[in-house]
Image (cartoon, rainbow, N blue to C red):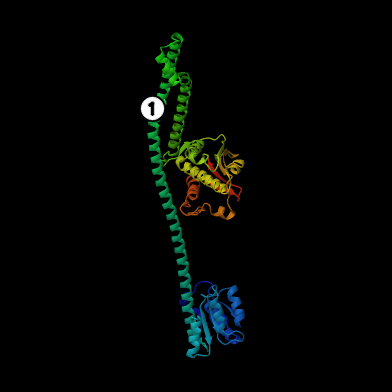
Amino acid sequence: MNYKTDIKTFDLPEDSLILVVDDTTTNLEIVFNILTNIGFKVITENNGESAIKQVESRPPDLILLDVMMPGIDGFETCKRLKYNSDTCDIPVIFMTANSDTESKVKGLNIGAVDYITKPFHEEELLARIKTHIQLRNLTKTLEKRVAERTAALSRALKDLQESQVQLVQTEKMSALGQLVAGVAHEINNPVGFIHGNLGHASAYFQDMSKIINLYQQHYPNPVPEIQKEIAAIDLKYMLADLPNLISSMKEGVQRIRNISTSLRTFSRADSSIKVYCNIHDGIDSTIMILKHRLKASEDRPDIQVIRDYGNLPEIECFIGQLNQVFMNLLANAIDALEESNVGHTYIEIEANPNQVLIQTSLTENKKHILIRIKDNGVGMSPDVQQKIFDHLFTTKPVGQGTGLGLSIARQIVVEKHGGTLEVNSAPEQGSEFIIKLPV
């Protein structure tokens, strides 16, 4: 029979490979000729050991396996193939002259998918092979589709999670910005009133001081009641100290005005269009807001913030979002410094003071600006550095960190501004974050 004419009825995939294992050369030749005439690629082995090695090096789409062979028989060969995760899915059809039910059940229990009885009926052999090759390819296609769909769903889930986090963070920052802007506005009004009135109060005091001096010049010996009151209020000290009090109040009011300005700068609302901004203003406003964490405490002296600013042009950016990046990086630097202080005395910390160095500069080609934020805290291991920007990764105890800060910081720098955010660190050597933004 010319089986070549029936090849269309098989609808065979390209490069279908069948391994035939039989210790009888005649059987191998017969099966080889039948299958190659149809269009299959065929490889042959004459024992179980070599068959297993062949499968491991070149996995076929189907195995025709003789039961009775020297060395390890077909049952044992099939067992070993099924125990191996790399070969367990390859369909095995047993070939045997023994057609008793017990042998068939044993083979099927081991993992075979079918039995072919010798001597072969060619039509039956091809029909069984066709069925199992098609099933094998359907399984492969289904597995591929499942893998692709799973990967697509995983990507979609990750994108959704990142979008949700960004949305929540954006809404939170927007609400915070509105709150801070409102507080800054409420502070600014009375502070402006006080600042303006202090100027008038200083002028009034100077006028009254002149009048008092004139009285003392022309009436050096006032009545006893006035002399007694002058002594009681220590008029001389009052006249000398009151300018200092007014000056101190002016300084305090100015500090409040600076804080208010910093709050308004930090909370500047982002529009859908980038605006040109001075990066240094954003950094300075963030430092002002974090000033309470930088001040000395019972356990340590001040955290020193060293600013080494270069001559930068204004850049087009979402300054509110970049301020959020500065806030995350500086807050993390303070956390690292506080962690490094654990177990050290005030004097020891004072001898090796906590520092945060902020440097800004232009790249040599003047196409980017660099912002370096470096601390001399605990530092990070290489493993932590690789994960530091991962979504939800945090080294902080439960309840003290969300694992979102640096992930969102990188997203803002990379996706929103086309820049880069990198970290250099080593245990006990501190950490340096480097922001690179296009001009």
Is residue 418 shown to the viewer in this render?
no
Give how far across and how far down residue 289 sits, in percent: 47, 39
* Residue lying at 61% horizontally and 49% vertically, measured from the top left: 428
Between residues 352 and 261, which one lies in front from this camera angle? 352
Q: Is residue 93 above or below residue 351?
A: below
Relative to residue 184, is residue 23 drawn left or right?
Answer: right
Q: Is residue 372 above or below residue 395?
A: above
Which residue position holds label 1? 193
Between residues 86 and 379, which one lies in front from this camera angle? 379
Is residue 228 shown to the viewer in this render?
yes
- Number of marks in the rendered image: 1
Give how far across and how far down residue 293 sits, in percent: 50, 41
Q: Residues within 10 Å of mark 1 (few under 14, many from 20)?
A: few
Between residues 94 and 219, which one lies in front from this camera angle? 219
* Residue lying at 40% horizontally and 46% vertically, measured from the top left: 172
- Snapshot quadrant of residue 50: bottom right
Q: Is residue 411 above or below residue 5?
A: above
- Snapshot quadrant of residue 68: bottom right
Relative to residue 199, is residue 347 drawn left or right?
Answer: right
Dot 1 amino acid type: Phe
Relative to residue 245, is residue 352 drawn left or right?
Answer: right
Determine whether the residue tagged by mark 1 lies in a helix, strand or loop: helix
Give how far across and how far down residue 332 sits, in percent: 52, 46
Give how far across and how far down residue 171 sits, in percent: 39, 46
Between residues 202 and 70, which one lies in front from this camera angle? 202
